[in-house]
Amino acid sequence: MKFFVDTAEIDAIRELNDLGMVDGVTTNPSLIKKSGRDILEVTREICSIVSGPVSAEVTAVDADTMIAEGRKLAEIAENIAVKVPLTWDGLKACKVLSDEGKMVNVTLCFSANQALLAAKAGATFISPFIGRLDDLNLDGLELIADIREIYDNYGFETNILAASIRTANHMSECAKIGADVATAPPAVIKAMANHVLTDKGLDQFLKDIKDAGIKIV
């Protein structure tokens, strides 16, 4: 499973990229706002750091303007994936942009039917939102499994990009189900390294090292 980092913070992206933990980046208007930078400027810098897909989201809601914005965003770099919402207009924009050879990430997916439509429209990525479904006491991971089954049934090439990841457990469960990609905030990716028994074992090792006066260099 590929890891995308869900942020527009350059330092966080650079740190994870240097460790080989980033296969791509997802952004959205909220993350761009949080960064405090111009959307075109920060997106261009992210694309210069990461070689994989960088999702940049349109701001329009009608198909024609989405298409125009998508074309402009795609000019930033070859690894731009134009991000459009899963609305009927978004699907129209997806079809046009995909037919032009551009990567398209269809976002805000909350049902298997929506994912099926996105695949039919030629989406490169479909982004089902796990955490937001969980917030409504629905099973976000079940949606990932449903989409995986449907796509495998018919050989759709659209990548399942699990989004709205809230916990490290979400990451491992998505990997078991077979999501192609999971996008998560930097803190969640780092939390995957944590385990109480690792901490306990390390504390014991450090105590023994101190008691034995062990030095390597």
Image (cartoon, rainbow, N blue to C red):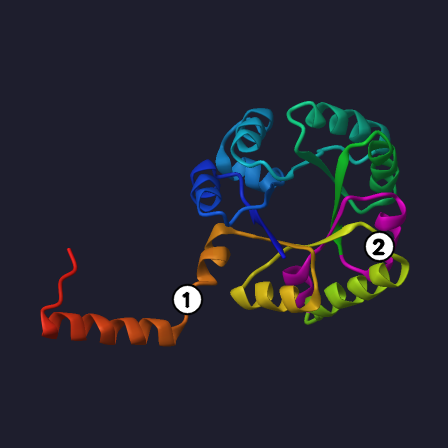
- For the N terminus, the image quarter is bottom right
Disc 1 and disc 2 in contact, CB within 8 angstroms? no
For badge 2, the amino acid type reads Gln
200 vs 44, left or right, is left
- For the C terminus, the image quarter is bottom left
Compare residues 210 and 168 and report the one nearer the observer. 210
- The residue identified by callout 2 is 114
Disc nearer the start of the sequence (1/2): 2
Q: How crowded is mark 2: few (under 14 residues within 10 Å), some or many (20 or more)?
A: many
150 vs 59, left or right, is right
Q: Which residue lies furthest to the front in this view?
A: 216
192 vs 105, left or right, is left
Q: Which disc, if any, is residue 194?
A: 1
Magenta residues (range): 110-136
Say above or below: 214 vs 87: below
Compare residues 191 and 36 and report the one nearer the observer. 191
Say above or below: 123 vs 182: above
Residue at image location 16% in from the left, 60% down from the top: 216
Q: Is residue 129 magenta?
A: yes
Give the percent coordinates (x, y) of residue 11.
42, 38
Q: How crowded is mark 1: few (under 14 residues within 10 Å), some or many (20 or more)?
A: few
127 vs 25, left or right, is right
For label 1, the SS is: loop
> How many dots with numbers?
2
Q: Is residue 28 magenta?
A: no
Give the percent coordinates (x, y) of residue 192.
48, 63
Residue at image location 75% in from the left, 67% down from the top: 145
Say above or below: 31 vs 175: above
Residue at image location 84% in from the left, 29% down from the top: 100
Give the percent coordinates (x, y) of residue 60.
76, 32
